[in-house]
Image (spheres, grey):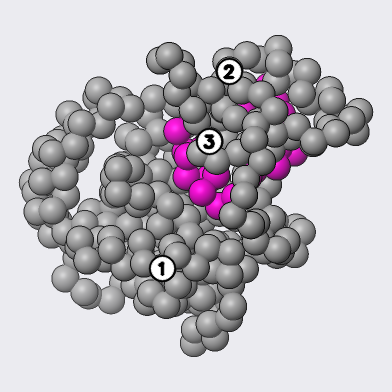
Amino acid sequence: MTAEPQDSPVEIHFPDFADHVQGLVGHHVEFFLASNETLRSHLNETPYGHKLTWLDFTDTAEKGWSTREFLNLFNVINGIAFGDRGIPMPQWVMVDLILMPSAAVIASLPQDAFAEMVERSTFRFDTDVKRLLREVLDSMRAGGYTGPVPVGGYCAAPSAAPGTWVGWSLWSLMPAVGLGQAAKALALSAYQAKKLDGVTQYDNSALKVHTRFGPLKILVATVPFHTSPGSFVYESDFTIPPAGPGMPKASFLLDPFDYERQAAMQKTIEAGQSEFYVLPPGHLAIDGTTYVPVLELS
């Protein structure tokens, strides 16, 4: 039994994302909703009017290719995409934090299209990606796997606060076509999320995707305990009215590696003196250096 489609707060704020999703589907991208049957009635399987392919990780029914291998590939390729940050996802995390209590939206390509994408793409974010993906292809072919291949995805976990979700994994091998944006939009609508909290880094290119969902309120400006330096906690609130056409200008441009400035921002937040927001487009390149546009409200 599936959940009855409702007016998702995310879809109300960003209705134009529907056309973007359909454009990707027209280029052979298939979107899966991976979870388990006990949660199916609580998830919206038709976000933005697009029917996600249901994938129960406990299902052993024959469908021509292995669910286990597909999810293993998701984990392996996710690790390749995040390898430069040193935070690959252990397999038990995938089971305990995604597939059991939540769900992942996984974007995939047929194997031939995946192989063409690997050879065509430059993967500027990591020079080893092409080599590693070629090894994945060779391993798939040697093992006889013939199913689809993950090329991106989004995961979030339910929070103790009702309606709030915590996003913790966004990745895409096809950033030029907005695959990350589509995966996140579909997932947030599938969860029927009202608010989204998350941790990312000021230098992370994913800020370009996150800020397409509106300005990010910085809840915690620096998280020294995190594995990646320059991490901060943000929130997107989909319960407030959608922003108008105008966007305020940044108060300042933040160097992603200016940890002293980030610590000072945190002191200001703790003192209740200011609120800070990361504005679209997330990153601005000036004279070869990347900065984060930040709005400060006293």
Other-residue count near label 1 (Cα within 10 Å), few / some / many at <14 / 14–19 / ≥20: some
Vertical position of residue 176 compared to residue 8: above or below: above
Q: Within the image, what quadrant is residue 163 found in?
A: bottom right
Figure label count: 3
Q: Does residue 273 appear to the left or right of 226 in the view shown?
A: right
Residue for point 75% across, 38% down = 219
Q: Does residue 281 appear to the left or right of 183 in the view shown?
A: right
Where residue 54 sits in the image (x, y, percent)? Answer: 38, 73
Say which label, 1 or 2, has the lower sequence index: 1
Q: Which residues are magenta?
A: 204-233
Say which label, 3 or 2, has the lower sequence index: 2
- Which label is found at residue 18? 1
Residue for point 57% across, 35% down = 200
Other-residue count near label 2 (Cα within 10 Å), few / some / many at <14 / 14–19 / ≥20: some
Residue holding disc 3:
282
Q: Quarter of the image containing the C terminus?
A: top right
- Which label is found at residue 255? 2
**What's the amino acid at mark 2?**
Asp
